[in-house]
Amino acid sequence: MEFLVSSGIINSYFRKLNDSLRTDVAVVGGGPSGLLAAALLAEKGYSVNLYEKSLAPGGGMWGGAMMFTSILIERNAASIAEESGMILAPGERGNYVVDSVQATAALINRACCSGVRIFNCISVEDLTFDRNEEVNGVVINWFPVLQKGLMVDPLMTGAKAVLDATGHPAEIATGLARKNGVKLSTASGGVAGERSLNVELGERNTVEFTCEVYPGLFVSGMSACAVGGGYRMGPVFGGMLLSGSKVADLIVKRIERKQL
């Protein structure tokens, strides 16, 4: 029986890993914008890998506000939240309050049910380039390996588009600019850095700065704010959902354009 348990797990996981070596979209980071973008793309029929270095996807959404497990969703994002299975309660000025644990679980469930291949405990440590110096994949390794500083070579996965949804650090876009000296589609050509908290402007910036920041590389959520120089917004998540929806559409347009 013990052999059957191990065999079933190993065979299943390595089928999933082998099937993921070429994908349409690689999403880096399993916060709300990354989860929603991945789910929307998979629902449109694209193959999607989502890499999350933590044990559980969800990003900062699990903890609510200072571990009070309630967060705010603005009314202009309410339909996306409901479509994702979130249970909304009326809040102030026409906005809504949701339970952060239920809302996060709903996003993860939507991504899983849509066919997104989620790889937890795996970190994206670099990008791959094609001959035109456009992003065409990711370099992956076990996060505990990187945490421990072990000298273990990574593996590579090909992708038609990569999404940096790593949150405040914007790890992928920052690494791309630092290592390759390339210019991003920002005012300075580099990562501007996140500004201090302003809820209204932060929500607007999260969506406004969601874009293709370099050929083949997109940013969403707090990564978009960090790259574009936007404000942070605190425990308000409507902008994250709108950003995930926007970037999914942008990625579809790129893939369709490249196929012409």
Image: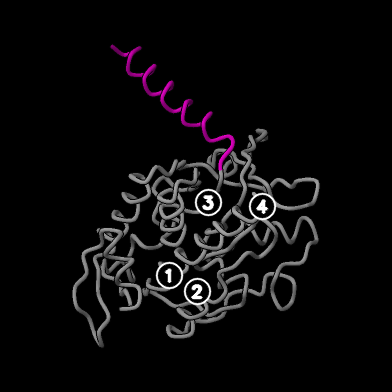
**Where the N terminus falls, by quadrant?**
top left
The residue furthest left is 89
Q: What is the distance, in whole Å, between disc 4 and disc 2 at their CAs?
A: 24 Å
Tell me whether the residue at label 1 lies in contact with that at label 2, contact meaning CB atoms closer than 8 angstroms. Answer: yes
Tell me whether the residue at label 4 lies in contact with that at label 1, contact meaning CB atoms closer than 8 angstroms. Answer: no
User: Label 4 amino acid?
Assistant: Lys
* Residue 163 vertical position relative to residue 46 in the rendered view, above or below: below
Tell me whether the residue at label 4 lies in contact with that at label 2, contact meaning CB atoms closer than 8 angstroms. Answer: no
Label of residue 27 in the image:
3
- The span picked out in magenta is 1-23
Foreground: disc 4 or disc 2: 4
The residue pinned by badge 1 equals 242
Q: In which image quadrant can residue 120 be found?
A: top left
- Counting residues from the start of the chain, the first of labels 1 and 2 encountered is 2
User: Label 3 amino acid?
Assistant: Val
How would you rate the neighbour count of disc 3 (Cα within 10 Å): few for under 14, some for 14-19, many for 20 or more? many
Q: What is the distance, in whole Å, between disc 1 and disc 3 at their CAs?
A: 16 Å
- Counting residues from the start of the chain, the first of labels 3 and 4 encountered is 3
How would you rate the neighbour count of disc 4 (Cα within 10 Å): few for under 14, some for 14-19, many for 20 or more? few
The residue shown at (78%, 62%) is: 182
* Along the viewing direction, whichever of 65 and 4 lies nearer the viewer: 4
Q: What is the distance, in whole Å, between disc 3 and disc 4 at their CAs?
A: 19 Å
Q: For mark 4, give the secondary structure.
A: helix
Foreground: disc 4 or disc 1: 4
Tell me whether the residue at label 1 lies in contact with that at label 3, contact meaning CB atoms closer than 8 angstroms. Answer: no
The residue pinned by badge 2 equals 207
- Image x and y of residue 156, in percent: 64, 37
- Counting residues from the start of the chain, the first of labels 4 and 2 encountered is 2
Q: For mark 1, give the secondary structure.
A: helix
- Counting residues from the start of the chain, the first of labels 2 and 3 encountered is 3
